[in-house]
Amino acid sequence: MDCCFPCLGARKKRKTPARPEKPQIPPAADNKAKPGCSSSSTSAAAAARQDSLSEAKKEFVLSNGSEHRHIAAQTFTFRELAAATNGFRADCLLGEGGFGRVYKGYLESINQVVAIKQLDRNGLQGNREFLVEVLMLSLLHHPHLVNLIGYCADGDQRLLVYEYMPLGSLEDHLHDPSPDKPRLDWNTRMKIAAGAAKGLEHLHDKTNPPVIYRDLKCSNILLGEGYHPKLSDFGLAKLGPVGDKTHVSTRVMGTYGYCAPEYAMTGQLTLKSDVYSYGVVLLEIITGRRAIDNTRAAGEQNLVAWVSCRFVFCYVPFCFFLLFFFIPL
Ligand SMILES: Nc1ncnc2c1ncn2[C@@H]1O[C@H](COP(=O)(O)OP(=O)(O)OP(=O)(O)O)[C@@H](O)[C@H]1O
Ligand SMILES: [Mg+2]
C-alpha cells in the first residue's frame, strides 16, 4: 500500500498537504443529514465548506473561463446510487483509497455498469478535490483518461460515478497478483506504459492551459478490456503555468515515492513533476517492485534510490569495462 507524501507511512493512502494553503474543509461526519435529502444545515461548518467550494470553483473559472459551458457530467440522487450498489453492499466493494470506498454498481437509468466512489466523510480528502475532479473530468476527454459519468452532491453526500474499468488498476496486477490475474507479459506492460504516456501527453501538450496531474501512480492507472489503460483521479490536478511562467507555486501534495524531489522541496510545480512520477511508474512496470516497499531491506525500500544505486555501481563500471577493452587506444 502506498503511503502518501509527505507524512511518511503515517496513514494508508492519504494525500496530505505539507502546509495548508487554505483553511481545511471541516469533515462532514458531524453533519447528520439523511441520505437522499438536501441539506438544510446552516451551521458554520456547512458555510465554511460552501465557501471553500466556491473558492475552488472561482479559481477554476478564473483560470479557465469556459467552465460552465463544458460540464457534461450528469447528476444522480443518493437514492439512485444506493439502489445501484444494493445499498453499498460489501460484495460490491471494488477498493478503497484516500477519498473513500469504490463500489461496482448498475445504473438502470442509463443501463450501464459503473464504478461509484463515495467520499469518506471522516477522510482528509474532501469537497475541494471532489469539485476539482468533477470540473477537470468534465472538461477533459480522451481515450486514455477515465470517463466521469456523473456525480451526486445530495446534502453532505459526495459521490463520483465513473465508467467501470473491468480489469481494475495497474497496481492490482503488478503488486497484488491473484490466481484470476495472470502475470502481465512484457508487451502488455509496454502497452500500458504507452497508453498512460498518451493520457499524460494529452494533459500536458494538447490541453490549453496545460493540466498538471500530480497523482500519477500505479493505482491511478485503470485497465479496461484488453488492458487498455486510462488515467483516473484528478482531484489533485492543477492548471499549469502559462505565458512566461515556468511553474505554479502550490502546497506539496501527492503520494510519497512518486513526488518529484524538487517539487517536494520547493512547492514549485511544473509539468516535469508529472514526468518524474511517470518515470517511477515505468520503473515499477519494468522491475515489478513497488515505488516504496517497507517490507524490503534498508537500501531497497525506495525504488528510485535502489535503481540509481544499481546504475552507479553496476552499469557505470560496466561501461568503463567496455570502453577499456573494446575501444582501441
Ligand atoms: N472506475 C473504476 N473501475 C473499476 N475499479 C475502480 C475504478 N475506480 C477505482 N477502482 C478500484 O478502486 C480502487 C481504489 O481506488 P481509489 O482511486 O479510490 O484509490 P487509490 O487510487 O488506490 O488511492 P488514492 O486515493 O491514493 O488515489 C482502485 O485501486 C481500483 O481497484
Ligand atoms: Mg485512485
Image (tube, helix red, strand yellow):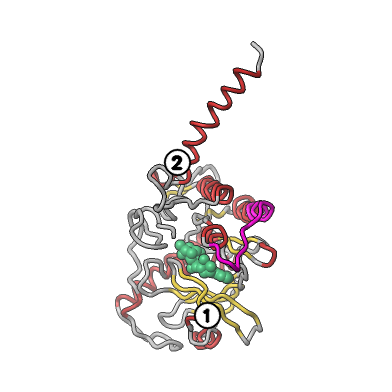
Please count the marks in the image: 2
Q: Residues under labels 1 and 2: Cα distance?
A: 38 Å
Q: Which mark is residue 92?
A: 1
Q: Amino acid at mark 1?
A: Cys
The x, y position of residue 50, in whole percent, is: 39, 73
Q: Nearer the viewer, residue 164 or 89?
A: 89
Per the image, is 187 magenta?
yes
Which contiguous range is marked in magenta? Answer: 177-194
Q: Nearer the viewer, residue 237 or 258?
A: 258
Work out which residue is located at the far front of the displayed protein and give it: 179
Label 2 residue SS: helix
Question: What residue sits right under mark 2 in the picture?
Answer: 305
Q: Is residue 74 left or right of residue 124?
A: right
Residue 227 visible in image: yes
Work out which residue is located at the far top of the displayed protein and give it: 329
Label 1 residue SS: helix
Q: Is residue 225 left or right of residue 53?
A: right
Question: Residue at point 53% right, 45% down?
Answer: 272
The x, y position of residue 54, in whole percent, is: 43, 69
Residue 207 visible in image: no
Q: Amino acid at mark 2?
A: Ala
